[in-house]
Amino acid sequence: MKIKPKKSSKIMETKSDRMFDITNKILVWFFIIIIMYPLIYIVSASISNPSFVNSGEMWLFPKDITFEGFQRVFESKDIWIGYRNTIFYTLLGTFINLAVTLPCAYALSRTELVGKGVIMGMLIFTMFFDGGLVPTYLLVRDLGMVNTIWAMVIPSAASVWNIIVTMTFFKVTIPRGLEEAAEVDGASVFRTFFQIVLPLSAPIIAVMALFYGVGHWNQYFGALIYLTDRELFPLQLILREILIQQEIATEIMMQGGNIEAIGEQARIASIVKYAVMIVSAAPLLIAYPFLQRFFLKGVMIGSVKG
Amino acid sequence: MNKTVNIETNDPKTSISNGVPKDRKVRTQRMRKIIKHWQLYILLAPAIIYFLVFKYYPMYGVQIAFKNFRAVDGILGNEWVGFDHFTRFFESYYFWDLMWNTLSINLYQLLLFPVSIIVALSLNELRDGKFKKTAQTITYAPHFISVVVFVGMLIAFLDPATGIINHFIQLLGFEPIDFMTSPAWFKTIFVFSGEWQNLGWGAIIYLAALAGIDPQLHEAAKVDGATRWQRIWHINLPGIMPTIIILLILNMGNFMSVGFEKILLMQNPLNLEASQVIQTYVYDIGLLNGQFSYSTAVGLFNSVINFIILIVFNRLARKTGTSLW
């Protein structure tokens, strides 16, 4: 007969340990509720009648369900343009990030590299000291990138932290013998990297694509300082207008005609506000539970080095 | 002619005594290594170029802080004014306000540094694997909310007339508070909301460190009759101490800059006296008002202070045996 070790250890548990377990569970539940409540509230508010939301009658579950908010958001040209631009910047930006990060990290992971210390020092120094906002802005302007898509993807082409994480991955997971064998057989460094190392590195490529991708998706400050052409605005800048500056485009207001009453405007502003939060965060929040393990992996690899 | 001869004879590395000097041998070996693996340097090139252009060139451009920059003359073509811009900043009446806001917000944030540690220790004690995983998934989620949406949430929740927080406050019989326009509330809102967003994410790294603690330590302590609480205090906490110190130092490395994009979004004319920090000020006067030289000087001041804090803190940490370098 099998003896379950779990049971025997349970017998040994003292009363104080059980008390500890209960207190700890309460603490964890406290954190969970604190974090879940605002998220649930937003979802409920986005599909509730805004007058119940604003009066506080809707405080947890949706009341008088309506999809007017989403309808107005989806009919807005600004939102669609922002969405399109954001997807584009995220894809292009992430591609550039990977094209810079992976080769660099691989080269740094090789013991044959002469001058590794100097290069690492040069990279790490930038984590703690930088030229500042204005010199960087002037540079981007002088390069003619202002008001082009390049301003959104080139100035953030690589992050030192991600390079270090990737380098650590290569060091830990790619066996040295494999590279040596390939090179004894006459493969060049390029060939080893592209045909042997990269195919073995799917996990780190996924992690990096996610880290960089989320960064691009959520970025607003670069767009704020480098872009003035509305056609180029990413979603986050449009959201800033709606959520922070509370300027709901008249175009969103006008749908459905009659908007004379100020009360009606406030009603629309309110319902659009919550719907737009959901729409912008939806792709990440839907994908997140499935991608979570990749994010964790990234942080874990980083902590090995740290 | 004379000069080159001088250099040759003065350089000990190239001076030839008998046979091949050791330094030269090492050097040729190195050269051979570099040539043999030249493709490694091609792989490095994009990153090196990126960092030189976008990180180091702006550091070179920082010299406009000591000049009167006019766009037509470019970075190099203006007369030097020494520390004029710095003195102007130090003597301006808002200097101490900016310093106070920058430092106090960061110190405030530092007070909440242990929250993530508590979350990690607490999650680590959960016996039920499924519940643990769910709890982790939920606590990490807010990290992925963009700063724009996040500040949008704050504005919506804290609205004096329609916000849910004020509905609760009224339910308890108090007057509604206009949080977002109140300087007195600004720092608390900023710091606590930031904690809400990152308490779970910040815990991941500690959880990783906790997973690395030798289980034999716990077994031995159990045999000796240690309670759960004692084991956390005497095994888990010391076990993750190096990680805590490293994260503290890294935190210090960003001491003057934490959360500037969020502050910028939370600012409005009414809370400005509490919400204007050095970096948002640089944005205001530099990019919005075009005072490039002056704002660069202010930014440089900020970077230098930041760097000094990092170095001092790292030196202190070295005494505990853990440091960045």
Image (spheres, grey):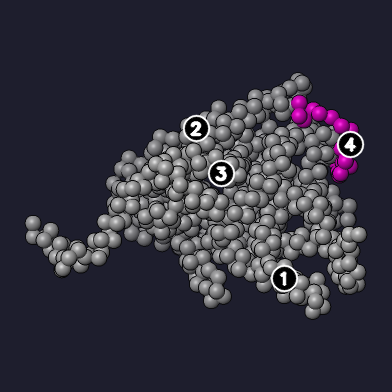
Residue B178: where, in percent of width, then height? 74, 51
Q: Do marks 1 and 4 share a chain? A: no
Q: Could you say whether the residue bearing mark 4 is in a helix, strand or loop?
A: loop
Residue A169: where, in percent of width, then height? 55, 51
* Left-right relation of B200 to B173: left
| Looking at the image, residue B16 lies above or below residue B319 | above
Q: CA distance from mark 1 to mark 2?
A: 55 Å
Q: Which mark is residue A214?
A: none
Q: CA distance from mark 4 to mark 2?
A: 42 Å
Residues marked 3 and 1 touching at CB (< 8 Å): no
* Left-right relation of B197 to A58: left
What chain does badge 3 belong to? A
Q: Is residue A148 magenta?
A: no
- Residue type pointed to by label 3: Ser
Q: Which mark is residue A63?
A: 4
Q: Which label sits in the foreground, 4 or 3?
A: 3
Q: Could you say whether the residue bearing mark 3 is in a helix, strand or loop?
A: loop
Q: Which mark is residue A201?
A: 3
Q: CA distance from mark 3 to mark 1?
A: 34 Å
Extent of the magenta region: A55-71
Q: Which mark is residue A149?
A: 2
Q: Could you say whether the residue bearing mark 2 is in a helix, strand or loop?
A: loop
Residues marked 4 and 3 touching at CB (< 8 Å): no
Residues marked 4 and 2 touching at CB (< 8 Å): no
